[in-house]
Amino acid sequence: MTIVLNGEKVDIKAASLIDALVELGYQDAKIATALNEEFVPETLRATIVLNDGDRLEILAPMQGG
Amino acid sequence: MSKLFYDTELKNPLMLGTAQYPSPSILADAFKMSGAGVATVSLRRESGADRAGQEFWQLIKDLNVPVLPNTAGCYTVKEAVTTAHMAREVFGTPWIKLEIIGHTDTLQPDVYGLVEGARILSEEGFQVFPYTTEDMVVAERLLEVGCEVLMPWGAPIGSGLGLNNEHGLRMLRAHFPDVPLVVDAGIGLPSQAAHAMELGYDAILLNTAVAKAGDPPLMAKAFADAICAGKAAYDADPMEPRDMAEPSTPVIGKAFL
């Protein structure tokens, strides 16, 4: 299926959010996730089923003022 | 005596931003030379193979100071609240520097959204550090919804103009003597930071003035020294200014010549 990851279309095979993160290379990374503009806590990632066209945001620590 | 920021006593009243430095090592040196008590951080998209966020996180952990995540760039309550949730999970802290921007040119806070966002986040257990103006009524509303710290701007973010409304900042200090107050944004020079501390402010949050200096670590040290001097001056209870001169050398005993 095709999802929109951080604003870019990507094709993935995984059906769940937690599997998608592994497929995309984010396992063990210090990240937070939001799906379709809603925060998804780490504890719920395994329960989230992805659908074609979903918008996934993956955020990480960054410089800030 | 230093006020607590929620349940935390800062080891240094300089809250230093982590953005715009020439290199990560210069950022680290700025923290080392200044002894800054808090590091402000943010969240951004993690894409591509370089995984810049992971390296940055390691750098921040090595600084060994409390981190204050921000919601910089958020224009709506929903954006800011969602960002705060994500920041709490990533950084493992209830602290959140709540920025809800209302104007693109001045980066002035949207104080209506700010109060609403602060209410939601406080109810959810966040410890909110609201980036606000010196408006007294807004300050009261923020305290009513659960904020225990206020962070009025000195001047627009990144402007380096200093304290645009000293009178308003004085009034805020006088009206809320027990609330930790931080001047956040607009500071360009150590003398401006010292001035804010002389007014009785409890901490200074700045970034650009250090990061964009020719020698950021040296400037960070200059700010830390100035903030320390300003705090000591306030604690020492400064004299009242007068309009007319008064001789400091005793007149009694002067010779008739």
Image (tube, grey):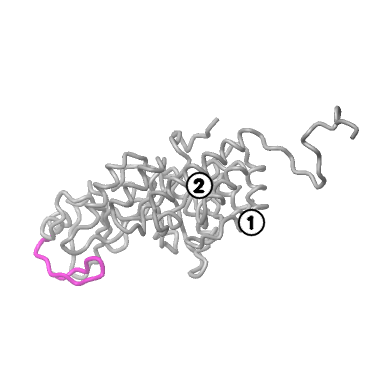
Relative height, residue A9 to residue B117 (above, below): below
Q: Position of residue B76 (x, y in %)?
A: 44, 62
Q: Position of residue A54 (x, y in %)?
A: 23, 67
Q: Is residue A24 left or right of residue B8?
A: left
Q: Disc 1 marks which amino acid?
A: Asn
The one nearer the camera, B25 or B11, is B25
Question: Which residue is pictured at 15% across the width and 62% down the height?
Answer: B49
Mark 1 → mark 2, Cα distance in angstroms = 16 Å
Q: For numbered disc 2, what is the local secondary structure?
A: strand
Q: Disc 2 marks which amino acid?
A: Ile
Question: Which residue is pictured at 27% across the width and 61% down the height?
Answer: B45
The one nearer the camera, B253 or B60, is B253
Q: Is residue B9 left or right of residue A36?
A: right
Q: Position of residue B212 (x, y in %)?
A: 41, 59
Instruction: Check the residue under mark 1 and report the chain it is in.
Output: B
User: Mark 2 sits on what residue?
Assistant: B204
The one nearer the camera, B49 or A22, is B49
Q: For numbered disc 1, what is the local secondary structure?
A: loop
User: Mark 1 sits on what residue?
Assistant: B165
**Residue A9 included in the magenta stretch of the image:** yes
**Residue B133 included in the magenta stretch of the image:** no
The magenta segment is A2-15
Q: Is residue B83 left or right of residue B115?
A: left
